[in-house]
Image (tube, rainbow, N blue to C red):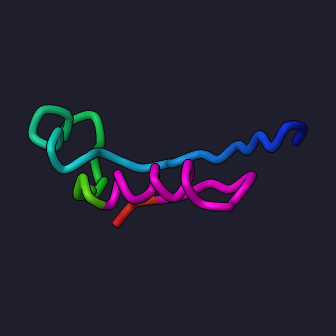
Amino acid sequence: MENGIRINVVSLGVVEDAYEKYKDLFPGHNPIPMAKVVNGYVRSVMGKINGEIIRIYE
């Protein structure tokens, strides 16, 4: 894209910290540790990838 703009997406289920509150809305999902979620966003923003879906489900 122009001006070095990159677009990435981080896709995940329910975060471990919120699992007890939202578990009924995410049946069958494994809770994801916050450290993995943060790393996904860091990879999206600070990495060199572009046009990627970063999937974090386990």
- Pinpoint residue 18: horizontal percent, then vertical percent: 17, 38
Q: The N terminus appears in which quarter of the rendering?
A: top right
- Give the residue at x 73% y 54%: 50
Residues drawn in magenta? 36-55
- Give the residue at x 12% y 32%: 21
- Pinpoint residue 29: horizontal percent, then vertical percent: 30, 53
- Give the residue at x 59% y 60%: 47
Q: Is 37 in the magenta? A: yes
| Residue 36 as seen in the image, left or right of residue 2 | left
- Pinpoint residue 39: horizontal percent, then vertical percent: 39, 59
In the foreground, 1 or 13 = 1
* Outermost residue to the left: 20
Q: The C terminus appears in which quarter of the rendering?
A: bottom left
* Outermost residue to the right: 2
* Outermost residue to the bottom: 58
| Residue 58 as seen in the image, left or right of residue 2 | left
Total marks drawn? 0
* Outermost residue to the front: 3
Q: Is 43 in the magenta? A: yes
| Residue 11 as seen in the image, left or right of residue 57 | right
- Give the residue at x 68% y 60%: 49
Work out whether 21 lies above or below 45.
above
| Residue 41 as seen in the image, left or right of residue 2 | left
In the foreground, 2 or 11 = 2
- Pinpoint residue 6: horizontal percent, then vertical percent: 73, 44
